[in-house]
Image (cartoon, rainbow, N blue to C red):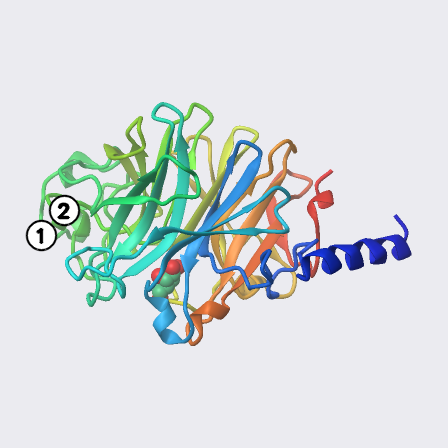
């Protein structure tokens, strides 16, 4: 298509809608929806359902206050991943002070999956109780029969109460208040000689484990996994959900012990699982970390920073949230990340980049100012 024709088509689209619909992905820029308003879906995840992509994320408001939840989870839909239609608030916070999701609590990193068996949309999110900072470390559950909602809040929990991970040594399978250097058994999920010697796993055995930054992953066989920063963020847990995706099965592993990872995201490519997360530096960006495994329950091997070029030390000023496989395209994945603005939360930006593969097949990420789905052959 020549330039003049492209220009006329752009004029036409702008003319009939009066809005500037996005034709390309421009990482870090304002991203207008169908109403010309910057998309408000932070820490988000995507779901492809019956030919349409749905983007769910944290609805933020202006100022620092926007770091708490005052509205809920926003949903947008798109056929092409560039122009997005506002579908409204999928899960609303409550005005009832007795509700765990009362306005002013913290709701982060929502992810929605579709359960075929029950024909139900299932949303899990990181939930902190109002006025308690990040202490509660719970994961919240909401469900809906319609993809765009409204979602009904069910409850918030600390997962796997009364269950030990699959990969800790038997020496650790007792609720002990403390562990010492001598209890280090060297297994992949072994409790490390923690700097402050507190056995957080044992401490939380009865009441359930801590669950902060999180994502969901559906494997090829339909099994769902909930992946979250646990044990005071020191260690990641990978947990199998029940068949209806509504509860934790009690089967889980602890991975990357004492590596303090946040912002988990995961994808599967040619039989291998790849995990991209961040370090733990609050809202400030840091270098992403890539890991690989043949089995989702591990063992996992860290491969280092997947980012290359300028900006690689800060993941291009952003933090991972989700990795989307593109429908109908082979080897095509989008790495999605947030460029947070904690002083004015609503102005957070989205950094979406194609996952590229080097000559050895390892994934890498590089900055691109402007790109489209034609990037994928
Ligand atoms: C980093 C996390 O990844 C975010 O989701 C948020 O919880 C901030 N920390 C809060 O400081």
Callout 2 environment at 10 Å: few (<14), some (14 to 19), or many (20+)? Answer: many
Q: Which residue is drawn at the image coordinates 27% and 48% (left, top)?
A: 139
Q: Earlier in the sequence, mark 2 or mark 1?
A: 1
Q: Nearer the viewer, residue 37 or 216?
A: 37
Q: Which mark is residue 333?
A: none
**For this view, does 28 lie left or right of residue 183?**
right
Percent of width and height locating residue 351: 57, 58
Helix, strand or loop at mark 1: loop
Q: Which residue is drawn at the image coordinates 90% and 57% (left, top)?
A: 4
Helix, strand or loop at mark 2: helix
Indicate whether 67 appears above or below 256.
Answer: below
Q: Nearer the viewer, residue 280 or 342?
A: 342
Q: Quadrant for the C terminus, please.
A: top right
Q: Which mark is residue 177?
A: 1
Q: Which mark is residue 202?
A: 2
Percent of width and height locating residue 72: 35, 57
Circles 2 and 1: CB atoms closer than 8 Å: yes
Indicate whether 147 appears above or below 24.
Answer: above
Q: Nearer the viewer, residue 47 or 375?
A: 47
Is residue 246 in view from this perspective? Answer: yes
Percent of width and height locating residue 241: 30, 33
């Amino acid at each position: 298509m020549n330039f003049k024709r492209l220009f006329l088509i752009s004029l036409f689209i702008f003319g009939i809608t009066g809005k500037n619909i996005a034709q390309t992905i421009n990482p870090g820029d304002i991203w207008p929806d169908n109403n010309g308003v910057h998309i408000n879906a932070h820490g988000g995840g995507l779901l492809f359902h019956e030919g349409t992509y749905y983007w769910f994320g944290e609805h933020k408001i202006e100022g620092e206050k926007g770091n708490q939840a005052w509205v809920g989870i926003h949903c947008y839909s798109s056929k092409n991943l560039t122009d997005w239609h506002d579908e409204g608030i999928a899960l609303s916070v409550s005005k009832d002070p007795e509700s765990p999701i009362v306005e002013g609590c913290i709701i982060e990193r929502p992810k929605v999956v579709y359960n075929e068996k029950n024909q139900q949309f299932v949303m899990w999110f990181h939930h902190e109780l109002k006025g308690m900072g990040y202490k509660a470390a719970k994961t919240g559950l909401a469900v809906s029969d319609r993809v765009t909602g409204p979602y009904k809040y069910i409850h918030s929990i600390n997962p796997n109460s009364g269950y030990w991970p699959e990969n800790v040594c038997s020496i650790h399978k007792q609720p002990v208040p403390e562990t010492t250097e001598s209890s280090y058994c060297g297994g992949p999920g072994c409790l490390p000689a923690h700097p402050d010697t507190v056995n957080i796993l044992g401490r939380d055995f009865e009441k359930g484990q801590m669950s902060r930054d999180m994502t969901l992953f559906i494997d090829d066989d339909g099994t769902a996994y909930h992946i979250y920063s646990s044990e005071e963020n020191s260690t990641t847990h990978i947990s199998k959900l029940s068949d209806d995706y509504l509860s934790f099965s009690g089967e889980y592993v602890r991975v990357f012990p004492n590596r303090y990872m946040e912002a988990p995201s995961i994808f599967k490519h040619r039989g291998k699982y790849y995990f991209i997360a961040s370090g733990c530096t609050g809202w400030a960006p840091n270098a992403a970390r890539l890991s690989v495994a043949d089995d989702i329950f591990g063992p996992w091997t860290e491969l280092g920073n997947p980012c290359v070029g300028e900006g690689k030390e800060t993941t291009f000023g952003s933090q991972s949230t989700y990795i989307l496989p593109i429908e109908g395209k082979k080897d095509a994945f989008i790495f999605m990340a947030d460029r947070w603005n904690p002083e004015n939360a609503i102005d957070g930006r989205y950094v979406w980049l194609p996952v590229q593969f080097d000559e050895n097949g390892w994934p890498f990420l590089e900055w691109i100012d402007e790109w489209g789905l034609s990037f994928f052959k």
